[in-house]
Image (cartoon, helix red, strand yellow):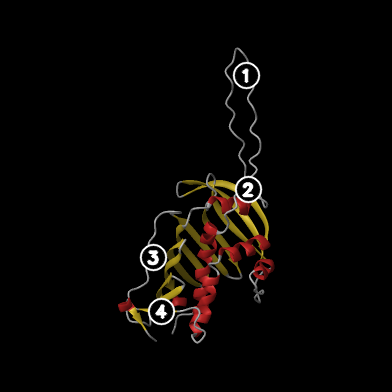
Amino acid sequence: MRFSSRVATTVVTLPLMLGLAACGSDKTATVNAGTTPTPVSTPSQAPKRVAPAVAHLNTASFLPAMKKSMVGKDSVRTTMKMVAGGQTMTVTGQQTMNPVAMQLEMNGAAFGGKAKMIVVKNMLYMSTPDLPAGKYLKIDPKDSSDPMAASLGGMLQEMDPSKTFESFDSGLKAAKFVKTETLDGRKVDRYAVTVDMAAALKAKGQKMVAGMPKTLVYTVWMGSADHLMYKIFFKMAGISMTMNASDWGKPITIKAPPASKIVSR
């Protein structure tokens, strides 16, 4: 099979890291918004209306605000572009977090052209260029006799929100407000988020890979009002990735392929 399962796992888990926050914590967090000055009035003059102070997130409030904003937002659509080794890969997808399900379409040389992946009820369905058109392989991640299951099974573990936030909470070094701007007609705040890679990986029981930087800076665009994540970018070791998210909380239906579409190797 020309499809690289290792590349697939890497690419697929990136969108998940955004979506997983929707069910990551039931605890609400209060972000310190500062104190709004009280206007002073006089008998001869109407009180002046004072705009509330704008509170930007910081290292302490960034993750709590993100978790709080995504409570109840159990679905999302994503588009992603990754450039690695001079090759461009694109991924469009949709996913739900309760229940956990995902549907992706991936394009690029790393996939041998166009590939599709569906995750439903802890089962993986893969459609790759070397299969008959419209057909899927059914992969049980728990099947120890299947090499591809072993490779892709880690992707389902990434869908455990508690593990994802353990890594973020452990690895987050700094979250710094950069500027307010407009993205797709929406007012967003841009943040530079620095992550200690060794600490983040250790929290997930993983080790640093040769060539990986000690820290990685993500550029994150969050809604100024709702603190939902709408865009994320990073660049490291010749790899760059941009992902956009939309339709948070809107209805999404993901179904497994019918039995007539399932084939064996």
Left or right, 47 with respect to 125, comes to right
- Label whose residue precedes the other's in the sequence (3 or 4): 4
- The reply to whether dot 3 and dot 1 touch (C-beta < 8 Å) is no
- The reply to whether dot 2 and dot 1 touch (C-beta < 8 Å) is no
Q: CA distance from mark 4 to mark 1?
A: 71 Å
Say what secondary structure mark 3 lies in.
Answer: loop
- The reply to whether dot 4 and dot 1 touch (C-beta < 8 Å) is no
**What's the amino acid at mark 4?**
Lys
**What's the amino acid at mark 1?**
Ser
Mark 1 crowd level (few <14, some 14–19, many ≥20, 10 Å Cα): few
Q: Which mark is residue 41?
A: 1
Left or right, 19 with respect to 195, comes to left
Q: CA distance from mark 2 to mark 1?
A: 32 Å
Q: CA distance from mark 3 to mark 4?
A: 15 Å
Pair 2/4: label in front = 4
Pair 3/2: label in front = 3
Q: Which mark is residue 138?
A: 4
Q: Position of residue 264 (x, y in %)?
A: 38, 85
Q: Is residue 85 visible?
A: no
**What's the amino acid at mark 2?**
Leu
From the image, which quarter does the C terminus lie in? bottom left
Q: Position of residue 214 (x, y in %)?
A: 69, 68
Q: Which mark is residue 254?
A: 3
Above or below: residue 201 compared with residue 97: below
Mark 4 crowd level (few <14, some 14–19, many ≥20, 10 Å Cα): many
Say what secondary structure mark 2 lies in.
Answer: loop
Q: Which residue is mark 2?
A: 57
Q: CA distance from mark 3 to mark 2?
A: 34 Å
